[in-house]
Amino acid sequence: MKRGLNRGLRAALIALATVVVSLCAAEIALRVFRPVEHLMPLDPAGLPQGITLFHQRASVPGLPFELVPGAHGNYAGVDVAINALGQRGPEYERAKPAGTFRVVAIGDSLTFGYGAPQEGTWPAALERQLAQDPALLGARAVQVMNLGVSAYNSADEALVLEAKALDLDPDVIVVGYFLNDPQIAPLQDLQRLFREPKMWERSHLLRLVDAWWFARSKARFDNDAFRYLHDPDSDRWQMVNDAFASMHRAASARHVPVVIATLPAFPPGPTWDDYRWSELHARVLAAAREHGLDAIDTVPEFQADGRRPKDLAVDFEHPNPAGAEVIARAVAHEIVRLAAAASPGDGH
């Protein structure tokens, strides 16, 4: 009996050693012959030239990265300048000047203005449009400060609202929500560069397994990444709800209204008819309102504009200056409505 047990143990150890050696061999083979890009932590030395030009590790706990104050250069074919406060746009004082109506815009690359000149971003267009509106509480000046940073998700935007936006004494905060904002996994270059990777993410073999699982999961949603990200039963969607709750908690303590503005992807067809992600926009707007936030959809403004989607976009995701004007119109209407409804005694 003892000899049989020894033989069984020896066989089990040999089998285990075989598995371990096979896994190690597979890991080495992937590293040498077919590196797995999915979730791969990035080294700054291996990035395309210029990708870190405007970014650094963030000073805010929990926030992975932020813009470098004073940075300047060419990015995505346009001139980009970061002001002394670490924002894209003009040099503003941190303290709000007397008689000024100040809006703070938060978001990702759509708000930052990927591929668009500074004056062609939607926060810049919003500032121009609000400055021309005589109904805006008689303010002598309007400022719209752009805190958008490429590759931020909803959790990042909630941290920016609490740690940065509220300190700027805003009258309104606008959060531009895009359909990849529930993204938790570090799929974009900036996230892979600055986010501290989990231990398993350093393994090519385990990342290969995760890539397979990711593809399999998306297939349940007809390989539509946006629908996958907005699965109501997922931790991704829970992250968005947690972010909205955090935004409301922080802003309501300072009596600052927050507007969640859903921004569209740009369909390839000639019109905006049957925009395929309308139900996802509706889900986001409903969640924002459930958490006490104001919320608007900018898609109806695009539909009313009459121009083809491709005439308003840099690419599938990013508005060009003409598209930025459309977003700004939708947001401006809502801000004027909020300003008109605000009581004179609330300080805003």
Image (cartoon, rainbow, N blue to C red):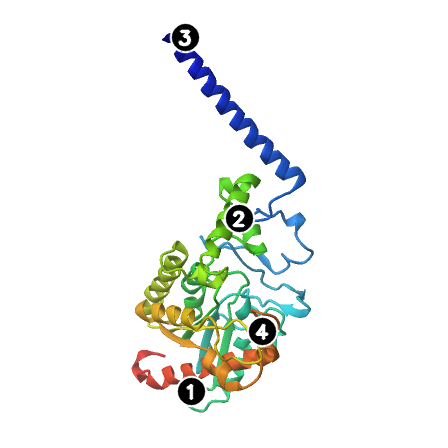
Q: Amino acid at mark 2?
A: Ala
Of the residues under marks 2 and 4, which one precedes in the sequence?
2
Q: Is residue 197 above or below residue 26?
A: below
Mark 4 or 1, closer to the camera: 4
Q: Secondary structure at mark 4?
A: loop
Q: Report the disc number at residue 3.
A: 3
Q: Residues within 10 Å of mark 2 (few under 14, many from 20)?
A: some
Of the residues under marks 3 and 4, which one precedes in the sequence?
3
Q: Report the disc number at residue 268.
A: 4
**Which residue sits furthest bottom?**
134
Q: Secondary structure at mark 3?
A: helix
Q: Quadrant of residue 318?
A: bottom right
Q: Front-most of 21 and 236?
A: 21
Query: What residue is at 36 percent from the left and 8 percent from the top?
Result: 1
Relative image position of residue 50 (x, y in whole percent): 67, 58
Q: Tell me the residue that label 2 is attached to.
A: 211
Residues tagged 1 and 2 counted as in contact (Cβ below 8 A): no
Q: Tell me the residue that label 1 is attached to.
A: 136
Q: Amino acid at mark 1?
A: Leu
Q: Front-most of 64 and 143?
A: 64
> How far is the residue under mark 2 from the one under mark 4?
27 Å
Relative image position of residue 206 (x, y in whole percent): 52, 40
Q: Report the disc number at residue 73.
A: none
Query: What residue is at 34 percent from the left and 63 percent from the top?
Result: 245
Q: Amino acid at mark 3?
A: Arg
